[in-house]
Amino acid sequence: MHIQIQCCGIVLMLTLFYFYMRQRRISLNTQRAFLGVFLATFICITVDILSIGAIEYRDLLPEHFVKFIAKSYLITLLGVAISALSYMSVDIYTNHNVYRRNMKTYLILALIGAIGTYIAPLDYHYDKDGVTVMYTHGPSLYVTYGMALIFFLRIFYLLRKEKAKINPRRREAVCIWLLIWIAASQIQFMYTNVLIVGYAGSIGIMVLYLKLENPETNLDRNTGLFSSGALYQYTKQLFAREIDFATLVIIFENTAYQNVPLGKRDAIKMELVEYLQKIPDILCFKNAEDEFFVIMENPQTAEQQAKTIRARFRSGWGDGQAHMVHPQWLYLPHTNVAGQADHLLYLIRHIRQNGTTFSEKDFFCIEKDSVDQMYRKKETEQLILEAIENDRVEVHYQPIFSTGEQRITSAEALVRIRGRDGALVAPGLFIEVAEESGMILRLGEIVFEKVCQFIQEHPLEQYGLHYIEVNLSVVQCAYEWLARDYINIMNKYQIDPKYINLEITESASTNAKKTLLDNMQSLIGYGVKFSLDDFGTGQSNLNYIVDMPVDIIKFDRSMTNSYFENGKAKYVMDAAIHMIHGMNLEIVSEGVETAEQYQTMQELGISHIQGYYFSKPLPAEEFIQFLKKQTS
């Protein structure tokens, strides 16, 4: 019966191996480690069968040969244990040299265990009639189980300690496999005539195959190309081994198939997929519905391969090559500049989202400066995130002077963040990144809440202030729930809305205009007032003033400076001032830095002046001290 059980294990493994070899595979470290586990388990079951036969026919065979075969089976159990440890270590030790050093240590321990197993005595146990051999026992068996236990304890230690580094599905599969193997070993140790460890190993291999190592899991079902998950694992492996390679990204935007009839698009897509799969020395992956990655591990020949692929696309597809497909192409001649697999994918996403201008109409070669730009953006995003999480977001206040009252009557709240070293980060370095990443919504909410808290703690009227201006970014203006969230914050701090003035920009009014107007009407109904910020930049148009329900128009610094530097700008600004006054709106002139500028703006009838002539933006406490000096 024992041999029948082991034979069932052999049949199961051969069946799995048949299906495994029939599938298209990609050369991943994890797959090689899986094959190591598979081979170790297969050898274990095979030698188990041989050992049962050798012991069964011990009378016909030399005694030392029988014990050698029996002990060899025990050694294969150590082989299974160390192959399991190798399989776990692939995820943990991504650096190939570190992986090899650790495996070398484990192999030395396995060798010591093997020597101990061969040296220690091994006995046979017979049934009552003294004829039929049932199982082996003795010190050799205990040495083997003891060493295997050490390896399995190490595996469980790594599963716990390096949890974050291990693929969760791999961790789950390995745990199931080990529990099956250990349970079988415990049963066989307690009931030594029940020889099921080898068969349990084959069941464990089936678990690994079904949950993780089936090559089909690395294939995209629609195209047959390797999947996005396989792309990440494969490029991660190349980066870990410090292998330079080239990457060609084929982007199928909506316009790519515009000249192809709808009924033929799927067939043509499969035709071009088959073409890519037949090209030697490349691997092709489907990363997204409209994005194929072509990986070329030989940078010396990659450029010619890329040209050949592009030339094929220019020759047409379908019957008679009558249909043209016009993708866009991103090419990295040396992908190692990206540094990591996730950085590579982020880089492609970054370039696509930022509307890169393609040369030759459809082709863009990604050089090191593009990568450096991506890294700077990624570092800035991390800087913003850390500032939000660690309360390093600050609000500075720049005073606004009233020419009518001849004193400071308001201030603009400006966001600032501090870096890890405590130094302030210039707004120009993070505002744009915050808007592109969407983090500006959280930053804006933090700033508004801090302003409301400031007003609650420092009643504005006692310092002669009428209101605080708070900027709204383009992203915030397009946010559907802006009014609801800001009203909730004002209610939280019991702030009279008359103390709040929100600034929108001209560009904000052109994007998601209906959403912006709905938010403005809700906030105006609550009691908040609005300013149109940065008038004079971008698409300057007085129609914006007519369309938007604002009370204040703010002249951008560049417009203020142009008045003194450009003769024509004077006439433009004079006309704008006249029209704005005619609509009974107030004007704030930003960027005033000299007494001459201040005097001129005042003579022009500008009602409010803001700039370094009065003060730079000040932290909250310094701003309060500044106001105290004014009122003293």
Image (cartoon, rainbow, N blue to C red):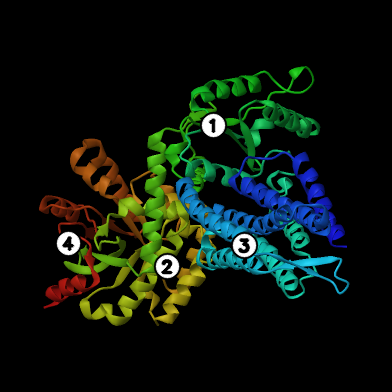
Above or below: residue 585 compared with residue 451: above
What secondary structure is marked by label 2? helix
Mark before the other along the chain sequence, 2 or 3: 3
Q: Position of residue 171 (x, y in %)?
A: 62, 62
Above or below: residue 483 compared with residue 358: below
Q: Which residue is mark 1?
A: 297
User: On the rendered image, what quadrant is the C terminus found in?
Assistant: bottom left
Whether tag 1 and tag 3 are in contact, CB under 8 A, the answer is: no
Residue at image position (57%, 68%) is 153
- Which amino acid, mark 4? Ser
In this rendering, the label closer to the viewer, 2 or 3: 3
In this rendering, the label closer to the viewer, 1 or 4: 1
Q: Which residue is mark 2?
A: 445
Q: Which residue is mark 3?
A: 171
Mark before the other along the chain sequence, 2 or 1: 1
Measure the C-alpha gap from mark 1 to mark 4.
Answer: 58 Å
